Image (cartoon, rainbow, N blue to C red):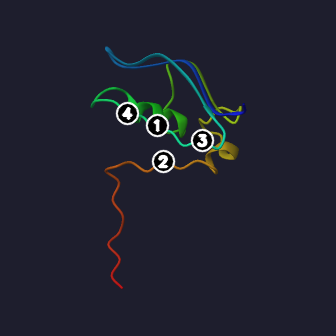
Amino acid sequence: MTAAISVANLTKRYGDVLALDQVSVDVAENTVCGLLGRNGAGKTTVMQILTGQNWQASGDVAIFGRPPFENEAVLRDVCFVKESQRYPDVSR
């Protein structure tokens, strides 16, 4: 199995709030998966780290074996659209 996403012992804090506590997961190439959890569970934080929009306090994150943060080669093939993201209203 080739891991498209590899996360090992991922931890992230926001001040005194522990958002992610040693999260580990591998997602195989050509796989569709989802993140489920209540509000505040850390789903958006994981996605922000995977897409280079945030950094981890500790742990390892790799997209096809390479770290995503400030990595143009990785980020040109990654897209993260937030649920709250708005698009211009286009009239035809």
Marks 2 and 3 sit apart, C-alpha to C-alpha, by: 16 Å
Residue furthest to the bottom in view is: 92
* Callout 3–callout 1 Cβ contact below 8 Å: no
* Residue 58 locus on image (x, y percent): 53, 16
Taking the spot 61% from the left edge, 46% from the top edge, the residue there is: 75
Front in this rendered view, residue 24 or 34: 34
- Residue at coordinates 49% horizontally, 39% vertically from top-left? 53
**Residue density around tag 3, few if under 14, some if 14–19, many if 20 or more, within 10 Å:** few
Task: First in sequence, mark 3 or 1: give its number.
Answer: 3
How far apart are the alpha carbons under marks 2 and 1? 8 Å
Q: Which mark is residue 31?
A: 3
Picture residue at 35% right of the left edge, 77% below the top: 90
SS class of the residue under badge 2? loop
**Tag 2: amino acid:** Phe
- Would residue 15 appear left or right of 10 to someone viewing this image? left
The residue tagged 1 is 48
Quadrant of residue 30 within the rendered picture: top right
Q: Name the image quarter holding the N terminus.
A: top right
Q: Are marks 2 and 3 in contact (CB under 8 Å)?
A: no
Q: Amino acid at mark 3?
A: Thr
Which callout, 4 or 1, points at the residue further toward the start of the chain? Answer: 4
